[in-house]
Amino acid sequence: MQSSSDLENPKQCEFKIGQRVHWAGDCRRIGTVKYVGEVEGYSGNWVGVEWDNRDGKHDGSVNGVRYFNAQFPKSASFARSHNLSTGVSLLQALDIRYRTSSTKEEEDEMYVLSASNKRVNVQLLGKDKIEDKLGRFEELPGASLFYLGVSSSGDPFQISKTLPNLKELDLTGNLLSEWQDVAAICSGLPALTALNLSSNTMSHSVVGISHLTNLRILVLNNTAINWSQIEELKDSLRAIEELHVMGNKLREITTTSSNIVQGFDSLRLLNLEDNYIADWGEILKLSQLKCLEQLHLNKNSIEHIWYPAADELPYSSASPDKSYKPFQKLRCLLIGANKIEDVASIDALNSYPGLVDIRCSENPATDPRRGGIARYVLIARLAKVEVLNGSEITPRERKDSEIRYVRLVMSKPHQNSEEIKRLHPRFSELKAFHGIEDERPSNGPTGPQKMASGLIAITLKCVGPSIGEKPPLTKKLPATTTVGKLKTLCESFFKLKSIKPLLYLQEEGSPLPTLLDDDMASLNDAGVCTQSTILVDEER
């Protein structure tokens, strides 16, 4: 039975399962239609919606009757059709964004408080000129139409006539779901080179799509897309240079005709951050992308990295190119916040021929707070890297790091040459390059002279708020001094009463200092060497 409002507005009942809608008056509250019909105990027709933000009342079941299945306990609700919007066309959204003038009430709300706490209205200088310029759509080089309820293209001819010079279009958070609508929008925008479709839940059906051939940048973050769909889009993306596919729960790189990804001949940047990829073998399927320079893999579940041997390379049976090295053009690799625990995975990055920019922070193997290796060790182990974790490595920092690393390895007891070669592949190379000789037992006098050869000069700086301003101290201490002993010495040096010190190693180029939390570790084992700076903080 329909309500009187439904009879008066029959179009409001024209909802279909799977359709994207938003709450009337709130373009950011977006959901998917899961049910259309009657609800037991209530009059008229209802629309069951599962909300993207999970802000609902139930899971599709009301009073013991199940109407549909939602993914979460309270992500769904029922609504009258007049409370939902099926969206607007591209040009309608353009009018809303750029031609809607602010009302007097809105302008009255634009104020600042004076020194006497009185409201002073704000006037926007040049407001009319700005609105006039934005209103001339034919001159717009870019348009940002995020969260405006765009659900369809409208007439492509009218789009082309209205926006002949539009090069960049941001459609984040709208109601688009059909690729045919995306193709229609692109067909009406011949100059378009960059398109952002983030947070539009796209259909899995990718059939007969064209008119994407001019796109150079395509952003598909949080669109529920999988790699099979990307493969189907490939022939339409012949000029694509940047492809962003973040937050799509990808686990596999599913190819169609071979065991490697083919095509994408202009692709320079591929962003796969914030997905579920765990097996590096999936990433190796991208190894034959001949223009790929940047690969973003932060926030996945990767545990181990390797460089494939010749017999492991995933060549295409259709056009094998065995002269091409895997990832030959790759310069930048972001693998932060994964699950890499073995240092061998870090060493394997040396085999990637052009890799000079690496982010590997927030992995167990590279996080000193979780027992991982320090920045200077990473620099020494990675031969070609010029930028590490977003910070440039200067020639001075590289030299100091490599020397410090060699001395650290040499200080480790009971390691034979084979064990050192396995655990520290660059040790012999660095030792020879920097002319570092093995320490020889002394036949001369012992005592003070012998002690001096093992001293390191460190600078201690107080940073604790309760410690007060104290000048830095430079002290020479044995490298075998433990962290716990240094804490006791700091209490004496700085006359700290009832303050328990915390020590941090401040490394050049590292954005954050490293906490020295193992009281039994020697300064040498903790990575402290001559000219190191130790920050003295306090427990809170």
Image (spheres, rainbow, N blue to C red):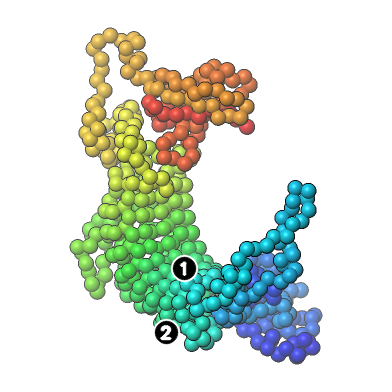
The residue mark sitting in front, 1 or 2, is: 1
Task: First in sequence, mark 1 or 2: give its number.
Answer: 2
Q: Is residue 230 left or right of residue 120?
A: left
Q: Quadrant of the N terminus?
A: bottom right
Vertical relation: 39 (above or below) 292: below
The amino acid pointed to by label 1 is Val
Q: Residues within 10 Å of mark 2 (few under 14, many from 20)?
A: few
**In this orientation, which residue lies closer to the viewer: 29 or 69?**
29
Q: Could you tell me how far apart the alpha carbons at marks 1 and 2 are, in whole angstroms?
A: 20 Å
Q: Is residue 6 left or right of residue 30?
A: right
The residue under label 1 is: 219
The residue under label 2 is: 208
Looking at the image, which residue is at 33% across and 62% down? 292
Q: Are marks 1 and 2 in contact (CB under 8 Å)?
A: no
Q: Secondary structure at mark 1?
A: strand
Looking at the image, which residue is at 50% across and 79% down? 138
Q: Residues within 10 Å of mark 1 (few under 14, many from 20)?
A: many
Looking at the image, which residue is at 42% across and 69% down? 217
Q: Is residue 256 visible?
A: no
Provide residue 14's location: percent of width, then percent of height: 65, 87
Provide residue 525's location: percent of width, then percent of height: 40, 29
